[in-house]
Image (cartoon, coloured by chain):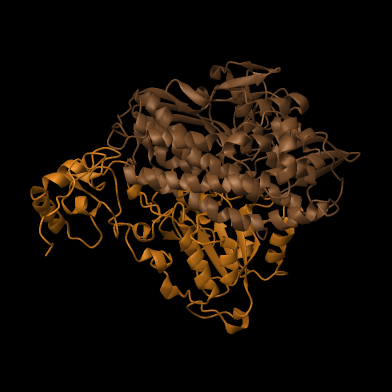
Chain colours: A brown, B orange
């Protein structure tokens, strides 16, 4: 057996290293290391509770709004505030804009360039993929970068700027909108929709959202496989059997995304053993057996602690190992769509289990599903009606913020005592997906997903299959450890 | 390599070839890179190329992974590849106990030691963002990772490389501070370096490029009229001036955020929240809650740069008493409750 250490893993957000035990050309075991620690949960201690709104977005440059939203929700719960409709709609729009921009960046900048690597030179689709998706020089980069930057101009009206806004407040949004700004936002959404329909999908968002089975998906792909980018991916993915690659635990979790009154666009829940179940967040524990952190017992996040122990024996990551009822769960767009009951997600997973293909498809579905929702939220905003309630000082209170970032479930657990942050624990999406082994030795979701992949025992480059599976989770390593 | 004595002006020997840029990330969030992708240009990569910059490797954007990436970095460190511009995003993590172990690179070395090696090869060393420049948010609170900037720790010179460090060009570390950086601060600084136009005279007292640091956030603030009359916001979303109550430091902070704007038409104060001084060293620990203006006897401690306190107090009380009803009422509302009157005659 050969042990290979693969790193630094690029085109993921932040730092990642993967250790593989390879035998007979197959990955037998994988160990995922998050090699950087900054200690946000320590930095926050003793701060004024509202200062969390300054610090937590800076955990992550790619999901900064998601971190803001979770903190604002935890603070709102502590203050007993219900933001007015305008504030809630503006917050949904802000988070949705970030999540969709992240899906787009992941697809074009992080994920697709791997199909332009020399290792695929012998495939019929290679020349097309290379011309289109080669990192930096591919024609898709040239098309996508200005579209992404222009789409992010919605943040000027919703949030002042991106990343690192302070507009998401416990009382709502600090950025009231005027009628003229609603019009400008609508035009920016229209422009983005046009790019998605023309260049990414080659069809209307509504038609993409209505794809309801694997068979329908591939039939839809055929006429578009050389003219639109998502069909290009599907063509490649089928050729490489990516629907067979990257199964993790096949248990999925979502905290529920884009709440709107009592409902949510994508509801909360758990999908396990082939059926939908209720989510019980009190069943979450964080294990630190394999983490360079002080502690023995797995703790509930509202009692959790984060204290480095860099010389800890048998530890191999700064990441904790969160478990739901003791089990590994996968989180992200695929989890959201499984729990929301999208027929295409359910069909793909039902036939093959979770996979590289299913994870990418779910992200693309969300681009198609969320833009129409954004159009609707925007139309419901009423300039002149309130956007934000004043905040309250907090003395002794706990608050929880549970939201869905692009890459999955993000939770903040806040404990305020005597007006200061006494404890602040964060479990980020990739903490779930890229966790190390727990006390029982059970590997995390990615560690499971890598086992069985083909891999050379020698060689310089990271095995391509490993790269596809790692990036299919759209990991955010800066959030993971924070 | 020729070492310019002062000013860091490019020598002719290199000016014909594109400059090799290596971008690394350490104790930060990657937000300066994500912000850079918002750059106001058709294609960021074309813009850099046209400016004479050859991107050797960037952790989020380049194809090469793992061993391929390590080779690029190692070749820069050994001198096999000429390293013209080293950009660091994120702070340097010195802990635990000076080992750099809070960020190890594959192979077991610390990022801290790799950065030291690279910085002594680089013609220019650029700190992108307040973390890399001064330590930033990562050095906040108890600073659990002993984080610092490349050549500063807060407002004190030193940091990883020490006060005396000079890159091969003769320039100290260029600090493009900001949390995050505005994309065009980065693009313009790199273009200026590539054009040989960035001397020490183009850097301010904290070695920030003057191309953005010679302005104050206050310049171009749309809340200007509210500021003039000290008509102040009381809660987030109010239209009034954010200085008196909500912690805004825009009258003191060096950056052109309200002149060049963010994401098209945005800025922090246009987003309804305070300027928290993210381009200034030590902004992460203001000594008061960020969203509350510290005051003594009802007067904000942080008065506008260059303004004598007595004058500020006198003018403030005078302007408050002269505040039009429109300005006073709009300041505490989230929309204009009274719009400016239109005069019937031609304006004089």
Tell me: residue B90, above or below residue A364.
below
Q: Position of residue B66 (x, y in %)?
A: 73, 51
Quarter of the picture holding the C terminus of chain B: bottom left
Residue at point 10%, 50% (across, down): B317
Q: Indicate the quadrant where residue B118 lies.
A: bottom right
Tell me: residue B224, above or below residue A104.
below
| Furthest-bottom residue in this view | B12
| Furthest-front residue in this view | A223
Q: Indicate the quadrant where residue B23 lies.
A: bottom right
Using residue A342 as the reference point, say whether residue B200 is left or right of it: left
Residue at point 24%, 57% (across, down): B304
Is residue A240 among the parts visible in the rendering? no
Tell me: residue B264, above or below residue B1.
above
| Furthest-right residue in this view | A24
Q: Position of residue B252 (x, y in %)?
A: 29, 57
Q: Position of residue A433 (x, y in %)?
A: 65, 33
Query: In this view of the protein, which residue sits in the foreground, A469 or B50?
Result: B50
Quarter of the picture holding the N terminus of chain B: bottom right
Is residue B257 among the parts visible in the rendering? yes
């Amino acid at each position: 057996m050969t042990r290979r250490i693969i790193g630094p893993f690029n085109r993921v957000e932040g730092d990642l290293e993967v250790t593989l035990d390879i035998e007979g050309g197959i990955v037998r075991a994988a160990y995922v290391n998050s090699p950087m620690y900054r200690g946000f949960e320590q930095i926050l201690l003793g701060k004024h509770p509202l200062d969390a709104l300054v610090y937590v977005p800076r955990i992550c440059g790619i999901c900064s709004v998601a971190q803001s939203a979770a903190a604002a929700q935890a603070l709102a719960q502590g203050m007993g505030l219900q933001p007015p409709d305008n504030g809630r709609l503006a917050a949904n729009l802000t988070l949705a804009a970030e999540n969709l921009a992240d899906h787009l960046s992941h697809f074009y900048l992080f994920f697709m360039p791997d199909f332009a690597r020399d290792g695929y030179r012998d495939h019929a689709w290679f020349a097309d993929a290379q011309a289109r998706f080669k990192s930096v020089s591919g024609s898709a980069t040239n098309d996508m970068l200005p579209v992404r930057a222009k789409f992010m101009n919605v943040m000027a009206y919703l949030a002042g700027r991106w990343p690192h806004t302070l507009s998401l407040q416990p009382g709502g949004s600090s950025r009231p909108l005027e009628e003229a700004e609603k019009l400008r936002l609508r035009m920016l959404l229209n422009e983005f929709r046009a790019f998605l329909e023309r260049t990414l999908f080659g069809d209307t968002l509504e038609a993409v959202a209505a794809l309801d089975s694997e068979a329908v998906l591939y039939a839809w792909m055929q006429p578009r496989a050389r003219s639109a980018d998502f069909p290009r991916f599907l063509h490649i993915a089928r050729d490489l059997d990516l629907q067979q690659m990257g199964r993790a635990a096949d248990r999925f979790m979502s905290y529920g995304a884009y709440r709107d009154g009592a409902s949510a666009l994508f509801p909360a829940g758990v999908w396990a053993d082939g059926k939908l179940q209720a989510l019980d967040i009190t069943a979450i524990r964080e294990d630190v057996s394999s983490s360079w952190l002080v502690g023995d017992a797995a703790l509930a996040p509202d009692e959790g602690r984060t204290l480095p122990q860099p010389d800890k024996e048998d530890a191999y990551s700064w990441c904790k190992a969160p478990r739901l009822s003791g089990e590994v769960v996968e989180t992200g767009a695929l989890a959201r769509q499984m729990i929301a009951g999208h027929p295409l997600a359910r069909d793909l997973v039902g036939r093959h289990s979770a996979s590289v293909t299913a994870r990418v498809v779910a992200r693309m579905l969300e681009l198609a599903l969320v833009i129409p929702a954004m159009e609707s939220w925007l139309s419901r905003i009423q300039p002149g009606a309130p956007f934000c309630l004043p905040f309250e000082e907090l003395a002794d209170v706990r608050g929880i913020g549970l939201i869905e970032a692009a890459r999955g479930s993000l939770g903040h657990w806040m404990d305020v005592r005597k007006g200061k942050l006494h404890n602040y624990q964060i479990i980020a999406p990739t903490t779930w997906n890229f966790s190390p082994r727990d006390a029982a030795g059970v590997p995390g979701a990615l560690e499971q997903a890598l086992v069985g992949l083909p891999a050379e025992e020698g060689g310089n480059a990271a095995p391509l299959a490993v790269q596809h599976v790692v990036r299919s989770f759209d990991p955010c390593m800066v959030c993971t450890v924070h | 390599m020729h070492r310019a004595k002062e000013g860091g002006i490019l020598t002719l020997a290199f000016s014909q070839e594109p400059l090799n840029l290596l971008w690394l990330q350490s104790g930060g969030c990657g937000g300066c890179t994500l912000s850079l992708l918002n750059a106001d240009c058709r294609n960021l990569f074309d813009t850099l190329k046209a400016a004479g910059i050859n991107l050797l490797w960037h952790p989020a954007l380049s194809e090469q992974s793992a061993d391929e990436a390590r080779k690029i970095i190692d070749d820069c460190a050994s001198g096999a590849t000429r390293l013209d511009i080293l950009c660091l995003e994120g702070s340097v993590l010195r802990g635990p106990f000076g080992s750099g172990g809070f960020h190890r690179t594959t192979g077991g070395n610390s990022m801290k030691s790799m950065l030291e090696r690279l910085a002594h090869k680089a013609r220019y060393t650029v700190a992108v963002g307040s973390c890399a420049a001064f330590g930033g948010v990562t050095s906040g609170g108890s600073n659990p990772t002993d984080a610092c900037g490349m050549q500063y720790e807060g407002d004190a010179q030193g940091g990883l490389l020490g006060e005396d460090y000079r890159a091969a060009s003769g320039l100290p570390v260029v600090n493009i501070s900001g949390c995050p950086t505005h994309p065009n601060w980065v693009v313009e600084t790199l273009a200026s370096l590539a054009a040989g136009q960035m001397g020490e005279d183009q850097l301010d007292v904290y070695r920030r490029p003057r191309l953005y640091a010679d302005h104050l956030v206050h310049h171009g603030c749309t809340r200007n009229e509210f500021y003039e009359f000290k008509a102040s916001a009381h809660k987030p979303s109010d239209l009034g001036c954010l200085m008196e109550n909500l912690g805004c430091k825009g009258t003191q902070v060096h950056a052109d955020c309200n002149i060049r704007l963010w994401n098209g038409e945005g800025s922090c104060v246009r987003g309804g929240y305070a300027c928290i001084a993210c381009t200034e060293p030590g902004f992460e620990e203001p000594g008061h809650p960020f969203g509350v203006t510290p005051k003594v006897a009802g007067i904000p401690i942080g008065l506008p740069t260059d303004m004598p306190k007595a004058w500020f107090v006198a003018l403030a009380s005078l302007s408050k008493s002269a505040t039009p009803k429109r300005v006073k009422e709009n300041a505490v509302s989230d929309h204009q409750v009274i719009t400016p009157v239109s005069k019937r005659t031609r304006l004089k």
